[in-house]
Image (cartoon, grey):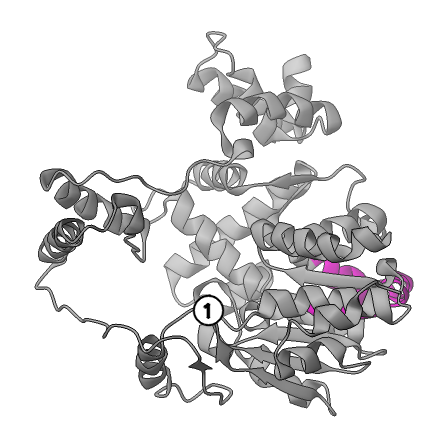
Amino acid sequence: MLLGLDRLLDDLNPPQREAVTVGEGPLLVLAGAGSGKTRVIAYRIAWLTGGQSLSPRNLLAVTFTNKAAKEMARRVEALLLPAGIRAPMIATFHSMCVRVLRQHGRHIGLPAHFVIYDEDDRGSLVKESLKELEVTERAATPGSVAQRISYWKNHMLGVEDAKRQARGPWEEKLALVFGRYEERLRASGAVDFDDLLLKTVKLFEEIPEALAYYRGLWRHVLVDEYQDTNRAQYRIIRQLTAEHQNICVVGDADQSIYKWRGADIRNILDFEHDYPGTKVIKLEQNYRSTQRILSLAAAVIDHNRQRKEKTLWTENAEGDKPKLYRAWDEHEEANFVAQSILGLRGEGVPWDGIAVFYRTNAQSRVLEDALRRARVPYGIVGGVRFYERREIKDALAYARLVVNPTDDVAFRRAIQTPARGIGAATVERLREAATRAGRSLLAVAAD
């Protein structure tokens, strides 16, 4: 029994407490922005595993980003470890699928030591596929074609589906590139991130024993940011919970912003239809914003026809009125931002008390130019992740070849790092020989 559980529940408002302590069965928590949903999920995990005799190994909590998973795990461990209870599996969809496929992927033809290709690897493979098929159109950049392939996969469309749905010669050509890309993936004993989801769906559909094992293992499933799930993620959750129905999803249709990468808002809108008897709890008290900001946001989102009704409110101060500035172009907008910052600085606001948010990275250049001209010191938040650094990827290429000698993408990186006087022409002749022989680059090079 988790020590001090009643005291922990006293920290919650009534709807939060209800969401934490609902027993078995489907639960939909509609959590508005700033309503404390992360705390609710962490406390619910602690309540189930520390107060309801559920073994931690029988609970799965899934979220979307590594950062969110780490933060969730940190909060749960702070609640459970003092009582000597280990935390359950808290993972992203992709890391959960890796675990499943490492253990059971052989049943659907995956090699034991399959490699997971990241965006750089995917781009390299697409580039090779374009070259092999002699696709030279200006629009056929590796990045744009990789995005198209990801779009197909996120909508659970295979190569033959892409060919059937092609509208005109250009899409037919892209579908052929998709097919060659898939062939190269298989030959390299590799999968991409989208495949992790698709192959888990395939495993659960084709191998009933594997599905039964995970249904028995994860008897309670929690999903964060449910409005951002795509069709494959939806299928996985449905497969896991179809029998026991112990599924808690937390989300907000008003915050669905990932349709461009396959997110399907119908997943959260239709949850009560998918799971009859669903308990619905709304978290409407906001702890983050002023009332004027909430009122402004509500005036905008109320125009959305596809949503679950809720009304956010706060006990915070009314706050300053939000301001809207209409600029003629991005340069005028950037100058306005720079001058506004100088004005705030003149009022005594410290530099590090000011933040500028922009929607896409492409917008940063004009903003940076304006800030430099105005002599405003600034820093860009973010950077290259450790495993995405060039020197780390170079070293890992060798390790990948040891584990999987058919990994052609890793071979291309390793053979040219450090520089050995092996140029692009030599690598191209090697590729042509490997293609003719139907063998990996490493195998041909070793002969």
Q: Nearer the viewer, residue 364 or 311?
A: 311
Secondary structure type for disc 1: helix
Q: Quadrant of the C terminus?
A: top right
Amino acid type, residue under disc 1 in the picture: Lys
Residue 193 % position (x, y)? 60, 50
206 is within the stretch colored magenta = yes
Residue 4 % position (x, y)? 79, 65
- Occupied quadrant, residue 29: bottom right
Q: Residue at x 27, y 49 (%)?
A: 362
In the image, taking residue 70 as reference, residue 336 lies left or right, namely left
- Occupied quadrant, residue 186: top right
Residue placed furthest toward the top: 421
Question: Is residue 36 visible to us here?
Answer: yes
Residue 219 % position (x, y)? 85, 69
Q: Is residue 19 above or below residue 341?
A: below
In the image, taking residue 329 as reference, residue 37 lies left or right, namely right
- Occupied quadrant, residue 270: bottom right
Which stretch did the figure color magenta? 199-223
Instruction: Characterize the local packing of mark 1: few (<14), some (14-19) or many (20 or more) Cα atoms within 10 angstroms.
Output: few
Q: Residue at x 68, y 61 (%)?
A: 62
Q: Residue at x 60, y 65 (%)?
A: 38
Residue 304 % position (x, y)? 39, 85
Secondary structure mainly formed by the magenta segment = helix
In the image, taking residue 214 as reference, residue 291 lies left or right, namely left
Question: Is residue 196 visible to us here?
Answer: no
Residue at numbered disc 1: 259
Q: Nearer the viewer, residue 419 or 92?
A: 92
